[in-house]
Each structure stands twice: as structure tokens, then as C-alpha cells.
Amino acid sequence: MRRRPQQKLNMTQSDTRLFWRVVILAGVLSCLPFVLTAIWYYYPKSPRDVRLSLFMEQSSGSPDKVSINTSASASTGEQFYLSQITTYYPSFQQAVDAFHPSAGIRLRRISGKVFQFENDDAATAYYWCDNGKAGPIGLCSVFTVKKNCNYSNVLEGGFTFTVTDPEKSFMIGRYRFTPEETVANYLSDEFLVLDRQSLPNDGRPTFFGISTDPTINNLRILDEPPTRIVKSRVRGKTYYVWIYEGLDLKQGLLDSIDANSGSFTLGRLIDALGIHFASSGDKRSQEVPIVNAPYLQRKSR
């Protein structure tokens, strides 16, 4: 008779342990869908199905006739640039030195010119920049138009490309970019500024991007290798800026698919332009000029 209270106590402790095990198991199972959703969302995956809208329009004239018209008949875009002109400088460097980005941008050049395009109409130079000491680095451009061999105040200046590690996480945390996808992502951004970017290069369609791979000379777009590659070292790391000049990717896309539609994707851009990498033994890869850009530390501006 005296053992029954002890037996009843033992059964109560067992039931309590079982109860908490059931509660914990139920909690784990209830959280499982959220955990799986988080894993699915953040797990790096291919961006080929990311939708794009390139907003390309058929050019009214041939690329070699693009210019800035300073007359009263200037187009809306040209009038916009002309309305921003406040002064002219006798040299391009003076125009660049007088440029002070707004405080919100905090743009700081951390190199000398990496490369530059210039003709009788305009000039553009590209520098390595950061957006504050803790921010990422990227290529930034300064753009001026010319009149009587003088250079206007900088009309556009800011980040052209931001780089963390272009072959791994291209600013979008849940995607893992292959080298081909990285190239296509650079190109998709450039169609928006193609006219301005090509203007100082005699209107020749001009595209470029950044790689950390020294074999970037094996890149092929529409079966063509880069026109040239600029090798540049900044913050202890070597980057390769690949440049295509005169390859009309815009017209190529307009002729083949509707790139303005909402169903256009990064993968379709890769397929339409035939973006791929040739074998290391390809002879044309060895013919791609690779030039070194001087590194020059500058004070913040």
C-alpha cells in the first residue's frame, strides 16, 4: 500500500517528459516550412531566369553619325545635356578636377584613369572609385561634351559598375553567377547608357565589364573576342576590364528577339548573344591586346 504513491509519482514524471518531447517535436515541425523556405530563398542559384527589360529602341542613324548637336535643332536628349553646361575648361583634366559629387554620393576616386574615350564631340574617362571607405569599389565615369576643343563641366559622374567578387555574388545575395551570367549582367545594364557611352568613341557601340579571371581573353560574344583588355590593380587585387568596340549587340538583339518584353531573361540574353568562353588554346585569344592601367592613389574629392 505504501508503494502506490511512489508509483503514481513516477508515472507523472514520465508523462511530463513525454509531454515536452511532443511539444518540442511539434515546434520543430511547425518551423520546418519556414526553415525550408529560408533555405530555398537564400541558397545560391542560377540567375538565368531573372527577367530583363532592356528598353532598346531602333537607332535613327548609323552608329558612326552619332554626335552632340549644339544647334537649336538638338534632340531632347541633347538639349538635356546642353542645359547642364555651366562652363567650359581648356583641358579635360581641369574639368575632372573641378567636379565635386554631391555629399550624398560620397564618390571618391582611388586611382588614375583606367581608360578613356574621346573625340571631337565628347570625352569620357573611367576611374576606380569607392562610395566611402567602408563601401565597395567600382568603376566610375566622368562625361563631358566638347565645343571648340574645350571641355564642359562634368555632366554625368557616378558608379558605372559596382564590384565585390563579380564571378561569385553579383550584388544579389541569393544568386550565384557563372562567368557567362556575369558578362550578361554587365551587358544588360549597359544598354541603358549605350548612346552616351559610345558617343566619345565615334559612336561605335561600346560595351565593357569587369573580371578577376586572367583568362577573360577567352570570352566570346557573337563569336568575337574582346577588342582589348585593361589590366588594373587596386586595393591589392587585380581586375581585368574587357572592352568590346564596334560590335553592335543592340542591333543583334533587335533583329532576333523582342528584348523589351517582360518575358526576356538573362538566360535568353546569353543564348541570343552566344556568350561563352573559348578553349585556352584558341589562337584569337592570344591576339587580344592586354594593357596595364597605371595605379595612382589620389586624395578624396
Image (cartoon, rainbow, N blue to C red):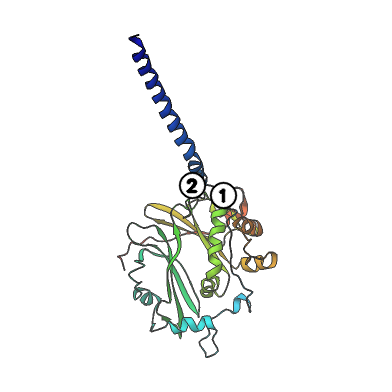
Residue at image coords 61%, 75%: 63
Residue at image coords 64%, 59%: 273
| Crowding at mark 1 (Cα within 10 Å: few <14, some 14-19, many 20+) | some
| 2 or 1: mark nearer the eye | 2
The answer to whether residue 288 is seen in the rendering is: no
Question: In the drawing, what numbered circle is on residue 42?
Answer: 2
Q: Which residue is mark 1?
A: 46
Question: In the drawing, what numbered circle is on residue 203?
Answer: none
Label pair 2/1, CB-CB below 8 angstroms: no
240 or 109: which is nearer to us? 109
Please, what is the three-letter code of the amino acid marked with disc 1?
Ser
Task: Label 2: state its secondary structure.
Answer: helix
The answer to whether residue 161 is seen in the rendering is: yes
33 or 204: which is nearer to us? 33
Position of residue 216 relative to residue 1, above or below, is below
Q: Quadrant of the N terminus?
A: top left
Q: Quadrant of the C terminus?
A: bottom left
